[in-house]
């Protein structure tokens, strides 16, 4: 993006950093070290938009920026018209081996450049509007029942390939259309829920749509195929799906892990077979998941598919490889990150001269060094807490004319501020750790 960011974008980013979370948008405003990936990924996004499919595995230790990378990529995909969905894999909420649950989470998190999650209903409404426009353009003389018949015929034509494997998807769309035209809002909403893979949809609504039961593991793949068709027809040429924290598979029961790994292999096989044109699938995981005994290596066919040679210097990694390695942060990168956020903050501050003067480059370096020290010197796990503390400092500088961070801000890290990984990295277990900045 070019030009100064809007006040709303700045606020969304800074509010998320205050909470210690990865912002949902605006990541391009302070991304550090991702430029080397951009050209190759933009090429893949463009190819997906013309009917290809793509896959990447993002690997990195905790704090290396996997979630940040995935959301940064999602922003680039949205700028090219793709829809996106970020799904957190977990043993209890979203087990990978239950693809019907993964599909349900996908539709709940479905977003476009103009619609936040869940964008499923607006996408489907947009698709029907597109069908109406296509029919009206081809047959301007049609109206009333004749027009509606032609729209239904076009629906069937567009979904013919999907109907061979998931006839219920097109049937439910037809039922939704009928309920909408009849003004039956409750039935229309229930059918949308069923199309999104939701459970316990009223029997009357399913009967009205001519469908039965609930979505199962195998039907989920057919519904994904149908969703891609709908997205393409209404102006979204592809879908980026991120399966985040997939390394949680290592902590589940053995048989569940095997099923999850096999589901991932099945997805990759289907992508290679050309079943999902327009799908860009991304998974994130730790090196242990890709190389350790409780991860990908337990399923040799999958391990072979994901194998990537990382024996060379990380500087020479290919951004076109199946696995993309994130090397994490060192103090220099952490300082660069802090300066980017400081400058972003100053652009909308009430007193920008105080921000740049009292939180100068030297202070940011001191803050990064001090915070890293309390985390056992592990710079890689420091960015989240570092940015949270930095924004806290910047708020105080902007709000109080006599606040000097070197004098008035003893850096304190309390246990409740730390994630489990950060807490384990902290030496000892004190109630709080106070650091003196130089």
Image: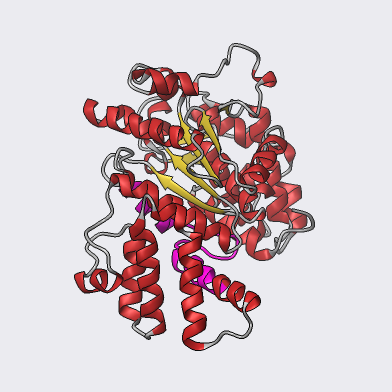
In which image quadrant can residue 308 be found?
Answer: top right
The residue sitting at 57% across, 31% down in the picture is: 370
x, y percent for residue 87: 42, 47
The residue sitting at 65% across, 29% down in the picture is: 319
| In the depicted structure, whether residue 82 falls above or below residue 305 | below
| In the depicted structure, whether residue 124 falls above or below residue 76 | below
Left or right: where 121 falls relative to 363: left
In this view, the residue in front, 35 or 162, is: 162
Give the overall secondary structure of the magenta segment: helix
Left or right: where 296 falls relative to 355: left
- Colour setting: secondary structure
Q: Quadrant of the C terminus?
A: top right
Left or right: where 323 falls relative to 99: right
Specify whether residue 87 is painted magenta.
Answer: no
| In the depicted structure, whether residue 234 falls above or below residue 97 | below
The residue sitting at 61% across, 54% down in the picture is: 78
In this view, the residue in front, 161 or 280, is: 161
In which image quadrant can residue 252 be found?
Answer: top left
x, y percent for residue 333: 66, 31
Question: Can residue 220 be spotted in the picture?
Answer: yes
Q: Find the residue positioned furthest to the bottom.
A: 144
Specify whether residue 112 is painted magenta.
Answer: yes
Question: Can residue 122 be spotted in the picture?
Answer: no
Q: Which residues fall within the magenta stretch?
A: 100-129
x, y percent for residue 354: 74, 54
The residue sitting at 40% across, 20% down in the picture is: 301
What is the number of callouts on the image? 0
x, y percent for residue 77: 62, 49
In this view, the residue in front, 182 or 74, is: 182
């Amino acid at each position: 993006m070019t030009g100064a960011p809007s006040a709303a974008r700045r606020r969304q980013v800074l509010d998320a950093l205050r909470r210690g979370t990865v912002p949902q948008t605006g990541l391009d405003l302070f991304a550090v070290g991702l430029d080397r990936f951009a050209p190759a990924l933009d090429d893949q996004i463009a190819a997906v938009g013309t009917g290809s499919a793509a896959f990447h595995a993002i690997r990195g230790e905790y704090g290396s920026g996997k979630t940040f990378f995935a959301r940064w990529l999602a922003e680039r995909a949205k700028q090219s018209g793709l829809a996106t969905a970020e799904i957190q894999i977990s043993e209890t909420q979203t087990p990978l081996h239950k693809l019907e649950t993964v599909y349900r989470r996908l539709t709940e998190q479905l977003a476009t450049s103009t619609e936040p999650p869940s964008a499923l209903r607006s996408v489907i409404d947009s698709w029907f509007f597109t069908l109406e426009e296509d029919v009206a353009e081809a047959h301007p003389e049609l109206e009333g029942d004749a027009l509606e018949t032609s729209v239904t015929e076009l629906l069937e034509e567009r979904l013919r390939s999907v109907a061979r494997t998931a006839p219920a998807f097109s049937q439910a769309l037809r039922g939704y259309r009928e309920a909408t035209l009849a003004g039956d809002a409750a039935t229309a909403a229930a059918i949308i829920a069923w199309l999104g893979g939701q459970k316990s949809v009223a029997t009357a609504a399913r009967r009205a749509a001519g469908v039965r039961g609930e979505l199962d593991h195998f039907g989920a793949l057919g519904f994904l195929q149908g969703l891609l068709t709908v997205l393409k027809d209404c102006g979204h040429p592809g879908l980026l799906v991120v399966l985040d924290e997939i390394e949680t598979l290592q902590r589940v029961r053995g048989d569940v892990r095997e099923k999850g790994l096999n589901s991932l292999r099945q997805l990759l096989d289907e992508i290679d077979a050309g079943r999902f044109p327009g799908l860009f699938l991304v998974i994130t995981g730790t090196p242990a998941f890709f190389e350790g005994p409780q991860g990908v290596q337990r399923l040799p066919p999958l391990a072979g598919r994901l194998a990537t040679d990382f024996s060379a210097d990380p500087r020479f990694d290919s951004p076109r490889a199946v696995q993309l390695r994130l090397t994490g942060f060192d103090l220099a990168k952490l300082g660069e990150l802090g300066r980017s956020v400081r400058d972003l903050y100053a652009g909308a501050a009430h007193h920008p001269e105080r921000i740049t003067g009292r939180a100068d480059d030297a202070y940011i370096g001191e803050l990064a060094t001090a915070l890293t020290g309390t985390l056992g010197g592990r710079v890689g796990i420091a960015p989240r807490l570092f940015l949270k503390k930095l924004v806290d400092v910047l708020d105080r500088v902007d709000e109080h004319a006599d606040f000097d961070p070197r004098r008035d801000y003893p850096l304190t890290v309390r246990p409740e501020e730390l994630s489990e990984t950060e807490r384990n990295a902290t030496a000892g277990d004190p109630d709080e750790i106070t650091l003196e900045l130089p």
